[in-house]
């Protein structure tokens, strides 16, 4: 294979998870037979250090079950995140037009309009684009591509700020998308990218952010290399808390590099993020954690324990399929979103149901898949339903027993 950023062919393969279907391909019982599993392996380019899926793990868009079927408005915590971002854009940039790529229901467009900016959203999920337009938040229902760019330029002119928050582009188009952004951006404009940060993934053990839709896993170092190839400069960077640890990078055609970039590049070096040993250590730790979870389930199965799961985000699919759990290990998964209730998890075929099951049934253990929110989830379960025993799988396996 060739590196998706620099085209070189020398790699360190360091994470190999079980073959599995796309993480968002929640399905009905009648579809079990048609399900396809793909490798899910991660490799690192030895030249530019971009961490990426292997070619064998890559699924073309038409086969990749994108999560648009379950696209839903953004939750309260993230709303606050986008309100703060809107304030920042308004106060730091002299903005006439802001374009948001992957604009959801207009969560960023709304506070921007309220502060007097002119905005356009681009959102491929039809239900969300419609919802935004109904609320007067100008949104084009499409992927971000040349055609969209031309339409925006002819309707409203070039953009002073373009935002892409947690939008993972399709890799074949990745270099094209950067060129499209460049042509839409005004000369002094800034492209703001928020993306999961690979250094945090290593630090926090959020390996379940690995799934087929996520082709690239950035450090600042590898992101900078990628944009440099397009004559763009990552001139400022901030660490942010979203999605288990992310960076917000500010990229422009002509602005000079600021201290924040130099500092984080140095920090990455100090933490050995450019050292292959660090990646192999991460994989060793991950495999150890997964083995401990397998052993726990072996024991609980022998004791005939009833186990429920909590939370069915895409990342729960990676966790379940990588460990090799299925509907014999876990009876059902509780999920707040009604869009997934009544369906089954990809690969493992565990039924998904509403939290109200806890009004009538008591599992011996509740395994928390949204484990980075385990405190909040435990509180919610106990306030509303009952006290339970919990399994928190990561960053280290923890079993919490009720008093
Ligand atoms: Zn490379």
Image (cartoon, rainbow, N blue to C red):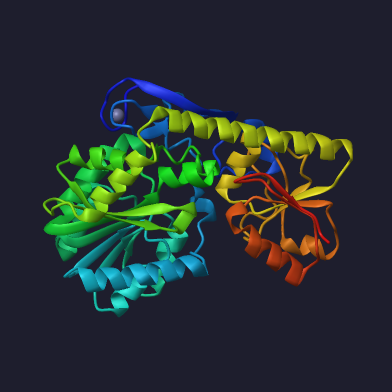
Report the quarter where the N terminus lies: top left
Number of marks in the rendered image: 0
Kindly tell me whether residue 133 is visible in this rendering.
no
Of all residues shown, which one is farthest toward the front? 270
Kindly tell me whether residue 365 is visible in this rendering.
yes
Is 153 or 374 nearer to us in this picture?
Answer: 374
Of all residues shown, which one is farthest toward the right? 303
Q: Position of residue 239 (x, y in %)?
A: 37, 56
Q: Is residue 96 above or below residue 402?
A: below
Report the quarter where the C terminus lies: bottom right
Quarter of the image where ligand 1 sits: top left
Relative side of 37 to 264, left or right: right
Q: Residue at x 13, y 54 (%)?
A: 255
Q: Is residue 122 above or below residue 64?
A: below
Q: Position of residue 240 (x, y in %)?
A: 40, 58
* Quadrant hosting residue 126: bottom left
Q: Residue at x 38, y 36 (%)?
A: 272
Q: Position of residue 44 (x, y in %)?
A: 39, 29
Q: Position of residue 291 (x, y in %)?
A: 68, 32
* Quadrant hosting residue 36: top right
Is 315 or 276 nearer to us in this picture?
Answer: 276
Q: Residue at x 31, y 31 (%)?
A: 4
């Amino acid at each position: 294979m060739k590196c998706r950023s620099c085209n070189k062919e020398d790699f360190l393969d360091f994470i190999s998870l079980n073959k599995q279907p796309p993480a968002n391909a929640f399905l009905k019982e009648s579809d079990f037979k048609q399900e396809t599993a793909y490798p899910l392996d991660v490799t690192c380019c030895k030249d530019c250090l971009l961490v990426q899926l292997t070619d064998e793990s890559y699924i073309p868009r038409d086969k990749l079950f994108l999560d648009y079927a379950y696209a839903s408005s953004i939750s309260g915590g993230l709303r606050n995140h986008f309100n703060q971002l809107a304030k920042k854009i308004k106060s730091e940039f002299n903005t006439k037009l802001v374009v948001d790529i992957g604009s959801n229901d207009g969560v960023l467009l709304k506070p921007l309009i309220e502060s007097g900016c002119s905005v356009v959203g681009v959102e491929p999920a039809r239900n969300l684009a419609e919802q935004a337009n109904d609320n007067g938040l100008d949104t084009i229902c499409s992927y971000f591509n040349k055609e969209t760019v031309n339409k925006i330029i002819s309707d409203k002119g070039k953009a002073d700020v373009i935002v892409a928050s947690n939008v993972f582009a399709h890799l074949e188009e990745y270099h094209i998308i950067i060129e499209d952004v460049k042509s839409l951006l005004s000369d002094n404009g800034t492209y703001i990218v928020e993306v999961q940060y690979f250094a945090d993934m290593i630090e926090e053990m959020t390996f379940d952010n690995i799934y087929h839709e996520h082709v690239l896993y950035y450090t600042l170092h590898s992101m900078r290399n990628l944009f440099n190839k397009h004559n763009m400069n990552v001139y400022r960077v901030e660490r942010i808390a979203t999605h288990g640890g992310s960076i917000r990078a500010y990229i422009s055609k002509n602005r000079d590099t600021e201290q924040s970039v130099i500092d984080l590049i140095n920090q990455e070096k100090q933490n050995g993020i450019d050292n292959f040993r660090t990646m192999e250590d991460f994989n060793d730790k991950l495999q150890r954690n997964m083995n401990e979870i397998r052993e726990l389930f072996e024991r609980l199965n022998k004791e005939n324990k009833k186990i429920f799961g909590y939370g069915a985000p895409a990342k729960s699919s990676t966790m379940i399929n990588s460990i090799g759990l299925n509907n014999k290990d876990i009876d059902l998964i509780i999920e707040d979103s009604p869009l997934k209730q009544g369906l089954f998890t990809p690969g493992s075929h565990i039924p998904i149901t509403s939290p109200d099951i806890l009004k009538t049934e008591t599992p011996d253990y509740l395994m928390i898949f949204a484990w980075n929110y385990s405190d909040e989830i435990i509180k919610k379960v106990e306030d509303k339903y009952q006290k339970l025993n919990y399994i928190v799988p990561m960053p280290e396996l923890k079993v919490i027993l009720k008093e």
